[in-house]
Image: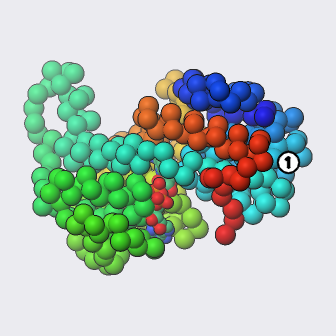
């Protein structure tokens, strides 16, 4: 199969080429994201392979189908950037990577939590300047604190287990609770209890119309004063302007995010020599109690290797007429 790979970085090429060695598909790499301006690059390809910030809305999907594509292979878990109804309408199958390494994302969430609580980002900068003063670096013991996990799927459950290992009380909320969450000693709680009791809230649910801005001015007003918020899921879960107000009023004690609602035009590229036009992100970065990483939670060797193998496997399944093990359809 001829596959157009969009938003391709050198690590994508290396890992996809390795995964494709036996399968022998023709992979063409484009470093630009897929959108209406770039979709013409896919004309003549049987499949496109896309990532989190590529745009596969109805117009793009129609153009893809018109150019001969029949498969959209996502090399990620979340699929909020694909209009699944439109894909079905235009005869395109869609596959994703259901699971690669929940550890990669959960461990990054823990790293962000430890860093924001113990001010590692500030200490790192200080000691490089021979400033060994401790003022402003005080954190709190995680042991004994209450951690709320919103979305207790694969990643949320790994995160919960790590937090239990720290001696935290772990409570969770999920629209579809799973007994697996409670096996190791965590328990489910209502949103009201989460707001009242959680010292730390970590988001692990998908971005859907229902979860868009679940963290907003209203919900932030109901969290425990000084709580830390960690978001490694999708930027659209958090109303960033409301979070900024909550940081200014100290209602939120700290924010650590790997995802940002307007990240599509910013993340995964080096903009260090340009003027960033996004004032909201710039304001966010100016807080001493905010850490932003650029959507790197998934970025471990194990995760990328599995993502690449699964993606190539989806292409092979499609090419050989087998059912797609990781197909997603509009519900
Ligand atoms: P998963 O499907 O295993 O778990 C998601 C959980 O969210 C499920 O238990 C589901 O029932 C729950 N959920 C759905 N709607 C909800 C709602 N309205 N309220 C509360 N919970 C709800 O997915 P996962 O593998 O654990 O991944 C979770 C999310 O992590 C993905 O959707 C993706 O957005 C994000 N992610 C981020 C990165 C990164 O690099 N930052 C990498 C992979 C995944």
Q: Residue 288: where, in percent of width, then height?
A: 28, 43
Could you say which is closer to the camera, residue 45 or residue 309? 309
Which secondary structure, mark 1?
Answer: helix
Residue drawn where x is 35% and y is 59% of the image:
157
Q: Residue 222: where, in percent of width, then height?
A: 32, 73
In the rendered view of the protein, which quadrant contains the N terminus? top right
Could you say which is closer to the camera, residue 196 or residue 27? 27
Q: Is residue 206 left or right of residue 90?
A: left
> In which quarter of the view is residue 83 placed?
bottom right
Residue drawn where x is 43% and y is 44% of the image:
101
Q: Is residue 165 left or right of residue 109?
A: left
Q: Is residue 46 left or right of residue 282?
A: right
Q: Residue 215: where, in percent of width, then height?
A: 42, 65
Disc 1 residue: CB within 8 Å of ligand 1 = no
Could you say which is closer to the camera, residue 320 or residue 164? 320
Residue drawn where x is 12% and y is 45% of the image:
138
Label 1: how many Cα within 10 Å (few below 14, some 14–19, many 20+): many
Q: Tell me if residue 175 comes above or below residue 164 in the rendering.
A: below
Residue drawn where x is 39% and y is 42% of the image:
104
Q: In this figure, which residue is indicated by the disc labeled 1?
A: 65
In the rendered view of the protein, which quadrant contains the C terminus? bottom right
User: What is the count of numbered marks?
Assistant: 1
Q: Tell me if residue 142 comes above or below residue 169 in the rendering.
A: above
From where the camera sits, is residue 260 visible? no
Q: How is the image coloured?
A: rainbow
Q: Residue 275: where, in percent of width, then height?
A: 53, 31
Q: Tell me if residue 213 comes above or below residue 265 in the rendering.
A: below
From where the camera sits, is residue 26 visible? yes
């Amino acid at each position: 199969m001829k596959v157009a790979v969009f938003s391709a970085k050198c690590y994508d090429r290396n890992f996809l080429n390795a995964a494709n060695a036996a399968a022998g598909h023709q992979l063409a790499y484009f470093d630009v994201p897929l959108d209406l301006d770039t979709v013409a690059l896919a004309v003549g390809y049987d499949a496109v392979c896309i990532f989190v910030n590529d745009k596969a809305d109805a117009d793009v999907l129609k153009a893809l189908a018109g150019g001969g594509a029949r498969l959209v292979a996502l090399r990620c878990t979340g699929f909020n950037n694909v209009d699944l109804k439109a894909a079905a309408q235009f005869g395109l199958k869609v596959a994703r990577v259901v699971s690669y390494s929940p550890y990669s994302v959960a461990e990054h969430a823990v790293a962000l939590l430890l860093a924001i609580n113990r001010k590692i980002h500030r200490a790192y900068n200080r000691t490089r300047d021979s400033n060994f003063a401790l003022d402003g670096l005080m954190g709190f013991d995680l042991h004994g604190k209450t951690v709320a996990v919103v979305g207790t799927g694969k990643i949320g459950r790994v995160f919960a287990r790590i937090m239990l290992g720290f001696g935290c009380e772990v409570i969770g909320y999920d629209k579809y609770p799973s007994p697996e969450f409670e096996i190791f000693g965590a328990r489910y709680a209502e949103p009201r209890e989460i707001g009242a009791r959680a010292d730390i809230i970590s988001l692990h649910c998908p971005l859907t119309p229902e979860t868009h801005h679940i963290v907003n001015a209203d919900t932030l007003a109901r969290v425990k004063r000084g709580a830390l918020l960690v978001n490694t899921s999708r930027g659209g879960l958090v109303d960033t302007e409301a979070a900024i107000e909550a940081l200014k009023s100290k209602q939120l004690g700290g924010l650590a995010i790997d995802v940002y609602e307007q990240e599509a035009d910013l993340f995964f590229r080096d903009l260090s020599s340009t003027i960033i036009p996004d004032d909201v992100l710039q304001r966010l970065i100016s807080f001493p109690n905010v850490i932003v990483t650029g959507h790197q939670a998934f970025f471990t060797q194990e995760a990328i290797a599995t993502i690449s193998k699964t993606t190539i496997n989806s292409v092979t399944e499609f090419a050989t007429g087998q059912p797609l093990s990781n197909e997603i359809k509009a519900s």
